[in-house]
Amino acid sequence: MALRITDECINCDVCEPQCPNEAISMGPDYYIIDPFRCTECVGHYGEPQCQVVCPVECIEIDPDCQEDQPTLLAKYQSLTKAEANH
Ligand code: SF4
Ligand code: SF4
């Protein structure tokens, strides 16, 4: 599953540099997560780093982006390959 940031985000900037996939960026009002880049940190860490650092716990699983572990791992591998080709 990809994660999403709710409107409780206080734009503290803490999560953005923690994301290994560069999936987090500033949106129109608060930070947003690109579901095509978020692997739930699978492939990099044992737990979602943005959730770990968020001081207001406003990052949750996106019910519209439900993916199982093999799918997340495949996404990680695809992203890593894309980076290597840059
Ligand atoms: Fe980035 Fe991991 Fe958070 Fe997804 S769960 S947005 S990959 S830090
Ligand atoms: Fe928003 Fe939480 Fe990220 Fe801070 S760490 S910018 S509150 S989502």
Image (spheres, rainbow, N blue to C red):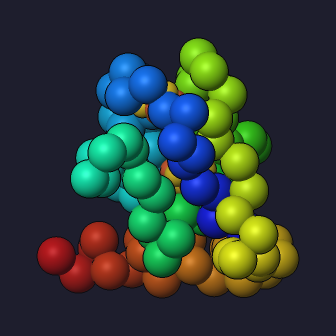
Give percent across and percent down for residue 86.
Answer: 16, 76
Nearest the viewer among 23 and 64 is: 64
- Residue placed farthest to the top in the image? 55
Q: Residue at x 48, y 82 (%)?
A: 78
Left or right position of 35 against 18: right
Give percent across and percent down for residue 20.
Answer: 44, 48
How many numbered discs sit on the rendered protein?
0
The quadrant holding residue 14 is top left
Vertical relation: 45 (above or below) 71: above
Q: Residue at x 76, y 69 (%)?
A: 63
Q: Residue at x 63, y 35 (%)?
A: 58
Give percent across and percent down for residue 80.
Answer: 42, 71
Give percent across and percent down for residue 2.
Answer: 64, 65
**Residue 21 visible from this viewpoint:** no
- Residue placed farthest to the left in the image? 86
Q: Residue at x 67, y 28 (%)?
A: 57
**Residue 69 visible from this viewpoint:** yes
The quadrant holding residue 81 is bottom left
The quadrant holding residue 23 is bottom left
Classify the position of the N terminus by image quarter.
bottom right
Left or right position of 13 against 56: left
Vertical relation: 1 (above or below) 3: below
